[in-house]
Image (tube, helix red, strand yellow):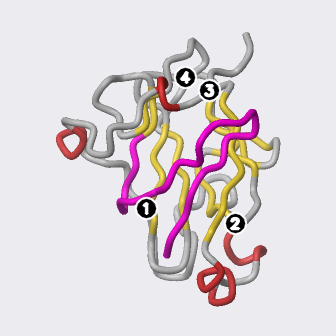
Amino acid sequence: MKAKLVPLDGGNPIELGKPILLIGRQASCDLMLEHKTVSRVHCILVLREVDLVLRDLGSTNGCRVNGQRLTESCLLHNDVLAVGAFKYRVRLDEDSIDDAPAPAERRFDPGHTECMEGSSVSPPNGSHFSRPTNGLSSRDVRRPSE
């Protein structure tokens, strides 16, 4: 599946070109967002065959999907994802949208760790993210107004 994040305040879309994308303020993150509302290691996005999963990694300000604070969620086409003060529209490729389960089947309930039956997402081991692999930084992303 292909996915991208489109900044709501303008800027270039961010293609999710790898299966796990670490987002945060730390230089070792795949997507580095330099802003006081973003934790050093804020969240991960896991791109799987038929879905895109968000997991907050204990950030101070949390992640929001369509305005609702969630610790884990399956992201759907056109969802609005907020990481700290940064807001993005989720875009999934057309083939994935047609094959995806219905929205009610894909949302996480608090305390649950499964997105689709029989699958789950675990927090990454820090050693997997020793260096950024796609070169994105906050210089590539427009800063939200403070």
Where is residue 117 shown, x and y percent of the image? 54, 82
Q: Which of marks 4 and 2 is nearer the N terminus?
A: 4
Q: What amino acid is found at the position of numbered circle 2 in the picture?
A: Leu
Q: Is residue 109 left or right of residue 114?
A: right
Find residue 121 and name its label: 1
Instruction: Check disc 2 and report the residue beneath it.
Output: 76
Question: In this rendering, which labeled residue sits more in front, label 2 or label 1?
Answer: 2
Instruction: Check disc 3 and report the residue beneath it.
Output: 142
Q: Nearer the viewer, residue 132 or 139?
A: 139
Please check the rendered image and state whether residue 63 is part of the magenta-colored stretch, yes or no: no
Residue at the image position 46 percent from the left and 57 percent from the top: 16
Residue at the image position 79 percent from the left and 43 percent from the top: 68
Which quadrant, please, contains the C terminus? top right
Where is residue 106 shown, x and y percent of the image? 67, 72
Q: Is mark 4 on a helix, strand or loop?
A: loop
Q: Which of marks 1 and 4 is nearer the N terminus?
A: 4
Q: Give the range drawn in magenta.
A: 1-22
Question: In this rendering, which labeled residue sits more in front, label 1 or label 4?
Answer: 4
Instruction: Check disc 4 and report the residue beneath it.
Output: 38
Identify whether 105 is placed above or below 141. Answer: below
Q: What amino acid is found at the position of numbered circle 1 in the picture?
A: Val
